[in-house]
Structures are given as C-alpha cells and as structure tokens.
Image: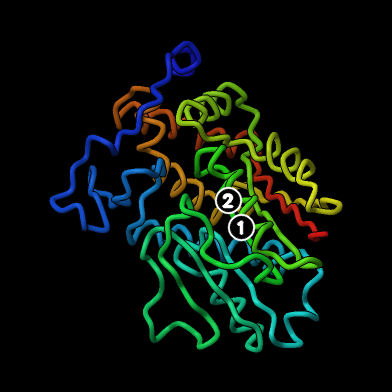
Amino acid sequence: MKNERSNREFDSSDPLKSVNSKNILDSFRYFKGRRYHNLTDVTYLFPNDDKEVERLHLQHNICRFVWKNNFSSPIHELLKSGNAKVLDIGCGAGHWIIDMAKEYPQATFVGIDMSPIFPDVKDIPSNVIFLQLNLNDGIPFPNETFDFVFQRFLCNCVVLEKWKFYVKEMIRVTIPGGWLEFFEFEIDNSDKQLIEAIHSGFKAKGINSSPETCVPQFLEKCQELSKVHYKEIYIPIGDWAGPLGTMTLTYVSMNFETIRLLLTSAWRIDDESYDSAYDVSKLDFNATKTYIKSIRWFSKKN
C-alpha cells in the first residue's frame, strides 16, 4: 500500500462538487454518512456534524491539559483588566472561546466560522458573539478593532493561498500593540513514507499539511508584525504513553476519519484500502512511540 501511494498520481479535484444538495439555501451537504458545508466557493473537505464536534471537544481538552493554558501571548493582564476584544478565526464549535470567556468575563469574544455548529444559546456566555461567515469574503470588522486575534489548526485545513489572505485580514483588524497567535500541529512519525503520502494528498488539494514549512516563513515576511515567538510541546500517541497517549490515539483516529474524504479522493482509493492503511499506522504509533508536535507562533503588531 505504501509503494502504491508513493507512486500514485494524486487527484486535485474537490469531491464535494459532485454532491448536490436539494436546495441551494441548505446549510449542509451529506456524503457517505457525514455532513459538510454547502458553500460552492470554498474548498474545505472536513465534516461539520456531531462527530466532528466531538473531535473538536477532545482536541480542545488535550491541548488545554498539555499546555496548561489556552494561549501563549503575554495578554493575561490585558484580558483581566476589562474592555479587551478577542477574535477567534475558524472557531468551530466554540470550545476555546467559551473556555476563554468564562476565564476572562470582563473581555469581549467574537468567534467566526463558516459552519453553524456553535453551542446552544443557553450555553453561550454573555460576553461571547458567534458569527457564521465565509472568511473568503474577509473579516467584516474595521481596521484595528481587536486586541488579540487567535487561530487554531486552520492552516492545514484550508487552501494555503486562502490561509495567507486570512492572516493578512487578521493583521488588519488587530490594533497596533495587539497580539496574533497561530496554533498548529504535525504528527512526528518514523514512517516517513506514510507522512509524505499524507502531505502529498493534502498538497493535491492546495493545502499545506506541514505548518512548520509555511507559517513562520509567512509571518516573518509580514512587515506589520514584530518578532515571531515560538513554543512547542510534544504530545505522545498510543497506549505506550499511558492515559494521555491513549486519549491522543483516540483523537488521531478521529482525525483520520475527518480527513477520510480528502485522502481517499486524493489517493484515488476506496474506504476499505484507507482503513487498512490506517490500521497499520495505528500499530506503528505504538511501536515507534510517535508524537504530535503542537506548535504556537505569536507576534505583536507594530
């Protein structure tokens, strides 16, 4: 299977283009039992159903447990003082922003995502606003509005050129002296052929699934930003690492389900072949003591 992947011609088409919803006004499309967005001008191949919300919840809990905080930028005192405005780009189901809003009730938080998978109104703190928006149209706020702008695990989900546009928009709406933070991850696995095949599958769709090769380089070219700071933490995957490793393995398994449509279409394989490839990888995670490398880049706007 590995040799087949390494020699394969990758498919760059968007498999959701062939999935027709019954109504152009519908918020969702359905494919192979999963729910997806219904925006014709967006290449985003991750689902947005209840299973995905569960994955995002587990993701948030792991990150919070390992990092012991929700951010690395030096903004704690600012958020405590009141009147600070915070923007979360690609906020998903809102786990990060809800957690932050409860910790800093004097600050105002705005979450933006293209999928309406936000919490029930009764579960949203009074200092939180969620907006369903297509980021391809830009961030609908004036220049220099927010003190802190945050983005988590978005670079390896969207087309790279679109991500660069989002970053420029994030910079635009941040006040001078405000902070921007980017949180991404990569799997550090000894099976280089598997990892390369995954990267190639994402690349075929225009997505860079190796944030370390693009995030810091692009940020350092942005003249509006000062020094780009960097922190990293390795998170173990597999039963070999105890309860945390087992929980992370569950999360990685959910990730492989989330990217199933993207990779099966890119690799031109069926679901059975995909499952076989992941079963081998899952065993390898334990045998090679694999880690997730989680990384935060943060910078102050000039």
How far across and how far down the image is residue 106, in percent? 66, 88
Residue at position x 64%, y 63% in the image: 173
Residue 77 visible in the current orientation: yes
How far across and how far down the image is residue 247, in percent? 54, 57
Residue at position x 64%, y 49% in the image: 184
**Circles 2, 1 touching at the beta carbon (< 8 Å):** yes
Q: Foreground: 173 or 210?
A: 173
Residue at position x 44%, y 42% in the image: 256
| Label 2 residue SS | helix
As drawn, the label of residue 166 is: 2
How far across and how far down the image is residue 147, in percent? 71, 72
Q: Foreground: 121 or 263?
A: 121
Judge the density around disc 1: few (<14), some (14-19), many (≥20) Cα neighbours within 10 Å.
many
| Label 1 residue SS | strand
The amino acid at mark 2 is Tyr
Q: Foreground: 233 or 26?
A: 26
The image's colouring method is: rainbow
CA separation, marks 2 and 1?
10 Å
The amino acid at mark 1 is Gln
Residue at the disc numbered 1? 151
